[in-house]
Structures are given as C-alpha cells and as structure tokens.
Amino acid sequence: MSDVDRIEQSLMDGGAWDAFCDQLKQVGRHVLRPEVPADPFTRAEGYRYLTRVLRSSFDIFTEHADPAFPVIYRPCDEMVKYGGDDPDKYLQKCVVSGALDYRIRGTRGTIQSVSFLTQGSNFGQGGTMLPTGFLDTDTLQIEEDGTFEILVSAKEQPGNWLPMTEDSQALLIRQTFGDRSKETIAELEIECLSSSGAPDPLDPVKFAEGLAAAVGFLDGTANLFGDWVERYQAHPNALPQEDPEITSRVGGDPAIAYFNSYWTLAEDEALVIELDHVPPCRAWSLQVCNYWMESLDYRYHRTNVNKETAHVEADGSVRIVISAKDPGWPNWLTTAGHTNGTFLFRLVKADEVVQPKTRVVKVSELA
C-alpha cells in the first residue's frame, strides 16, 4: 500500500482523526508540568492557552496552507496569544514556499514601523522558526504617495527584495505601534507570481497531513515556551537580557534586544523596574504576561508601557511599577488578577543596551 493509499484509508476508517485526538490529549501534559503553579486559575489559563494556539495552528496548516495562493492573516491577536506576544504589535503571517516567487503591495500608513521576516521552520519542527530573510522600514523604498512593492523570492531581485531560501515556508510581518489610539496600520496584499487560476479543491492527503502538523505545532510551541518559563523561574523578579541567538532561532526581530523573566508577587507587593536612562532608540516597551507567556488583556487593562506612553523623569530615568493595586505612580501596570507570570522588556535599534534594574517592595512604601 502506498503512502497516499494509507493516508486515504486512515480518513476512511477514522484513523487520522483518532490519531489527531490522541496526540491532542498528550499535549495536555504541558499544563501539568511539575514547575507549573498548582492552582485552578493557572491550570485553566493553561488549557485555554492550548485551545488558542490550536486555533492558530489550523490557520497555518489547514485553512491558509497553500503557498501558491497565499493569505495574509493574524496568527496572534487580542485573543490568540503565545510566546510573549507584544501588545504594541499588529502581527501578520503568510504561508509561502522558497520554490515560488511573490509580490507584496502595500500602503505605508502611519504606524511606527513595519518589518518582514521569512522563516525556514516552525515550532513543530524542533522548536525553531529559523530566519531566511529580513526587510524593514529602515531600508524599504517607499513612493511619495506612501505605496510600495516588495518582491519575495530565493533569487535576488532589484529594488525592495525580501530574500528566501529553498527551505522558506512562512512570512512573518510585524507592524509596531507607538500609540495604538493614533496610528493606522499598513495595508498589505500578497500574490504568488508563480501561479494563476484558482486553488484546487480540498486535497484529502494534504488535509490529513495538516491535522498532524497542526497538533505537532501546538505540542512544539507549548513545550518550547514551557521550557523558557522554567528557565526564567531560576531568576524571579529579575530581568536579564535573553541570548540573541536563542531569540533569533524562534523568529525574534534581529533589531530587538529582549529581556525576559518570571515574576511572582504577594497581594501587598510591587515589582519596580528602573532604567537609569533610555538610550536613543527606535522604540522600547515593557509588558506583563501570565505564566503561559500570553500578554495580559490589554483591551481592558494597562499591562504595557512604551516609549510613546511612558512618563520619563526629569533626569531621563524611567520607573515602572507592576502590582495588583494602583500605588498612584504614572507608569503603573496591573497584574490583572494574577499573582505570578512572565514579563518582557524590548529595546529596539538602540545605540546601547541598558540593563533594567528590579526590586520588590511593599505597595504601601510607594504610596
């Protein structure tokens, strides 16, 4: 029996679906890891986190999986979150193939910056998203009317060219806000120059393979960031810089210095993060996440602060407070009902890397 016959038979007898469900059940083990706080709230958020990442997985491997007919969509949004998603980002993604050529057309908008990154793997393939090409608004050639075109291919092109390799399989677009309330995102569309017509009907074999890939991505994502949080727990309430090699392997923006850690606070405690000065930079931000590296609900709570929204002291220093209760400080971020989680500081295209200082104090001391 050929591989195609075997896969089709698994669809006919329900084996493909049973295998998917069996794999999905096994992914639940990540919520029960011994280092995970053993309370119903954290566990519930953990299982919700798995359902959210699974939704994103289906977009990647079943709904928008044809690189010949690419679709730009949002893998993370106000509800689907993972990997320390950034409240200041409008994140978009698209499945591509290094064997094909593409054209992106766009209108710049007023958003602070836009970057394009091609990737050669996903979290279901060894826990990496290896970069294969990068282009951002510092080098992007834009017409006077705000429009631009980008050619995406493995072969070098004139003008705006976003490189790929034969292994490229995805395009990640990061649009970064300074102030969400005032800025408009870039409008983007993509077309494959190597295909025409309309997509073929659903391919049963590709769908079965997509089911397996989707749960593999979920498993790889949960495992990767579970390992990260376990590592952060070794230095609670501190904020060391992440190894740039580690962030690069998972698709981190090469222009960003990342500082990641774990926080844990009692109801009457506050975590103070201090910067002696902020170096000249395109942007910086600090955000609070839950244990599962999901940004807290920034739709209804102030859970992040950045270069445009922060209060800066007269001497150029910045002090940010994370606590359950508002101590009356201008740069206060709420824990939104959490007693522990992760937090993340980003420094974008800075002239120097500044190490944030942290200390835990009683909220009463800050009043």
Image (tube, rainbow, N blue to C red):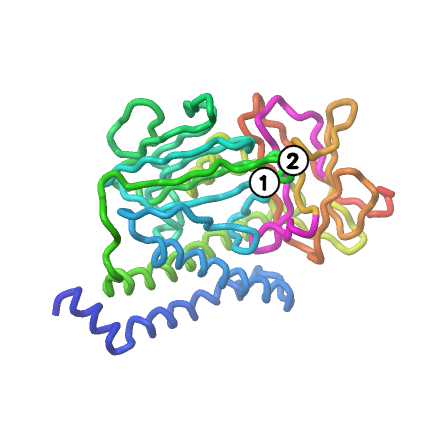
Residue 260, x across and y down, in percent: 58, 42
Identify the residue at the far front of this view: 145
Q: Label 1: which residue? A: 88
Residue 290 located within the stretch drawn in magenta = yes
Q: Nearer the viewer, residue 265 or 57?
A: 57
Say which amino acid is labelled 1. Asp
Q: What SS does tag 2 mark?
A: strand
Q: Which mark is residue 196?
A: none
For the N terminus, the quadrant is: bottom left
Q: Which picture quadrant has residue 40?
A: bottom right
Which residue does the image show at 61% across and 38% down from the upper left?
Answer: 345
Front one among 7 and 71: 71
Contact flag, marks 2 and 1 (Cβ < 8 Å) = yes
Q: Secondary structure at mark 1?
A: loop
Q: Is residue 60 left or right of residue 330?
A: left
- Determine the residue positioned at 46% across, 21% down: 144
Taking 161 as reference, is 38 above or below it?
Answer: below
Q: Earlier in the sequence, mark 2 or mark 1?
A: 1
Alpha carbon of mark 2 to alpha carbon of mark 1: how far? 8 Å
